[in-house]
Each structure stands twice: as structure tokens, then as C-alpha cells.
Image (cartoon, rainbow, N blue to C red):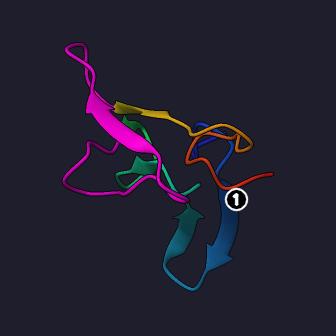
Amino acid sequence: MLCQNGATCSNTTTGYNCTCLPIHIGTHCERLKNCSEVACENGGTCTDVSTGGMTCQCVLGYTGQLCERT
């Protein structure tokens, strides 16, 4: 599959298009976003990871990659 990291692949007239999950970016959703490109939700704290990408530290009561779930 051309799209990576759980992205949705759609056929287009010129080939295909990847619709990335909120924390991924790139033509094939191959790269994790960093804190300047995505924000943690519900008061979560974003930390850039030295190997690339980011992580959210969620406040009590919230979970998910972006602290989007209760």
C-alpha cells in the first residue's frame, strides 16, 4: 500500500491521494508532525521527540495521540 501509518488511500484521475491521520504528514503520510505542526488537545503538553515526531502528555481524564479522547 502506498499510504502509510493508517492513512486512507483514494484513487484520483491522476493516481491516488493519501488522507493522513492528524499526527502524520507527507505525500504518503510517512512523517510524524512535530509540535509546530500539530497541537495537543484538552490541555495536553506537546514534546518534540529527538528521533522525529512528537508526543502529547495528556492531563488526567484524557487519552489518545492528541489527548482527544475522554
> Up-down: is 14 above or below 31?
below
Residue 11, image x and y in percent? Answer: 67, 73
Residue shown at the point (55%, 62%) measured from the top left: 18
Magenta stretch holds residue 39: yes
How many neighbours does mark 1 have within 10 angstroms: few (below 14), some (14-19), or many (20 or more)?
some
Question: Is 68 displayed left or right of 22 in the figure?
Answer: right
The percent coordinates of residue 1 (x first, y second) are 67, 39
Residue extending farthest to the right is 70
Secondary structure of the magenta portion, mostly?
loop
**Which of these two is toward me, 31 or 66?**
66
Question: In the image, which residues are magenta?
Answer: 32-53
Q: How many marks?
A: 1
Quadrant hosting residue 39 = bottom left
The one of 53 and 9 positioned closer to us in this rendering: 53
The residue wearing badge 1 is 8
Q: Is residue 42 above or below residue 10?
A: above
Figure check: 50 above or below 64: above
Secondary structure state at the residue bearing disc 1: strand
Image coordinates for residue 56, horizontal then vertical, percent: 46, 36
The amino acid type of the residue labelled 1 equals Thr
